Image (cartoon, helix red, strand yellow):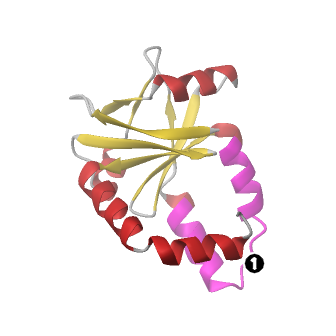
Amino acid sequence: MFRGRFEYALDDKGRIKIPSKFKDILYKKSVKILVLTIFDNCIYAYPQDVWEELEKKAVNLPLTNKSARRFKRMFFASAQDVNIDSQGRILIPPVLRNDSGITKEVVVLGNLDHIELWPKDNWEKELKALKESEEDLSEAIEQLGIF
């Protein structure tokens, strides 16, 4: 499982370093490809095996459900496979950098089954919003049965 928050800068070629903690998890699972997609104002990076499970679930979403159709268009149309290089970096394709607003500073978050890549300023806004709505979030989590 991916946990933690790290800050990095894109290099001149648009690559980002994967935190060594995450790289170790990926190497233990023999993951050499991450699937990147845009969601929730950031880039989600999935190990290929986790992504394939998502695809299996999504293919069964009802065609008659407008929300399901829209979700599949948004989530899967922007998906791109990227290789993890020998130094533990990934190249973020230009279209995903542009669509997510990533230019230089990137916050890398572990979110259990996937990694999130946030433009630093967007993450700071999200973190502020999370703190401001902490009480509402606590109630929602309780309703989900997590605590």
Q: State yes or no: residue 61 in magenta.
A: yes
Residue 135: x and y in percent read: 49, 75
Q: Which residue is mark 1?
A: 62
Residue 70: x and y in percent read: 56, 76
Q: Residues within 10 Å of mark 1 (few under 14, many from 20)?
A: few
Q: State yes or no: residue 42 in magenta.
A: no
Q: Secondary structure at mark 1?
A: loop
Query: What count of labels does the image hold?
Result: 1
**Residue at x-position 71% and y-position 63%:** 146
**Residue at x-position 57% and y-position 31%:** 33
Query: Amino acid under label 1?
Result: Pro
Residue 130: x and y in percent read: 41, 66
Name the residue furthest top: 86
**Residue at x-position 65% and y-position 38%:** 1
Q: Which residues are magenta?
A: 50-75
Work out whether residue 65 or residue 121 is closer to the camera in this orientation and state it: 121
Q: Main secondary structure of the magenta part?
A: helix
